[in-house]
Image (tube, rainbow, N blue to C red):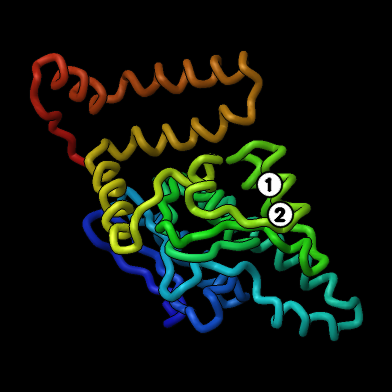
Amino acid sequence: MSDILLHEVKDKTEIITFNNPEKLNVLSDQMLELLTKALEKASRNSETKVVIIKSTGKAFCAGHDLKQMQKARNSSDKGLGYFKDLFNRCSKVMLAINKLPKPVIAEVQGIATAAGCQLVATCDIAVASKNASFGVNGVNIGLFCSTPMVALSRNISRKKTFEMLVTGDFLNAYQANEAGLINHVTEENELENKSKEIASKITEKFKRVVKIGKEAFYKQAEMSLEQAYEYTANVMAENMIYEETNEGISAFIEKRTPEWTE
């Protein structure tokens, strides 16, 4: 990976780090490409069970690279082709996180704005230091955050999302926690420990169960109530015939630790 994005594996955990603090870890063309490759690699790695996305510097991610976007205006179509491609590429990254067969944790130490806020909302779990803040403030520069609102409106209430979108106002970490955008608020020096604590709990679980659970979680959320119950009943029935599930239930009844191979 390039120096602006770091990727390492520790204790069955993939750690992806934005490392371009001078540019507030923006999702430039290069950063999007590197993040896409890192997520693909994490998806293929059968040895890991969870992914953490974090950043260096004061900002978690300040959204897209506005200077890079402005340069695209010099083309004959005023940049329309580039802009469509950019937002499609970014959307594919968000969908890749959603479809990744293992949980993804956002570890947010600073500002997360526009597509950066979208990224936090897209991750399955998010923890933040008390110094973090969250906004979809494109409206302040004449660009409505239409793609970020997709993930944001699926995390917090519609009215709160719309207010943020049309005012450009930010949520501090405690407000974001109360709204449901993030799971935990920590002191700055405890942030890494908190994300590792959650990751550690996930790595203790049977991997295939977490995989089917994540997939079912997002599928059922888009269904009607009847469809969701029919679908999840089938998922649970298939889950029950796993040999590992038999072992897990037997261990619980026998009051012992399950012996899983993964």
Based on the displayed image, in which of its 4 quarters is residue 32 positioned?
Answer: bottom right
Residue type pointed to by label 1: Val
Q: Is residue 40 visible?
A: no
Badge 1 crowding class, 10 Å Cα cut-off, few under 14, some 14 to 19, many 20 or more, is some
Q: Residue visible at 50% across and 70% down? A: 59
For label 1, the residue is: 150
Image position, residue 17 (x, y; %): 41, 69
- The residue type indicated by label 2 comes to Thr
In this picture, is 184 found above or below 35? above
Q: Position of residue 233 (x, y in %)?
A: 47, 16
Q: Residue furthest right?
A: 76
Q: Is residue 81 rendered to the left or right of residue 11? A: right
Q: Quadrant of the C terminus?
A: top left
Left or right: 221 with respect to 2?
A: right
Image point 65% across, 70% down: which residue?
64
**Circle 2/circle 1 CB separation < 8 Å:** yes
* Residue 123 horizontal side relative to residue 136, left or right: left
Residue 260 as seen in the image, left or right of residue 108: left
The disc at residue 147 is 2
Taking the spot 14% from the left edge, 14% from the top edge, the residue there is 253
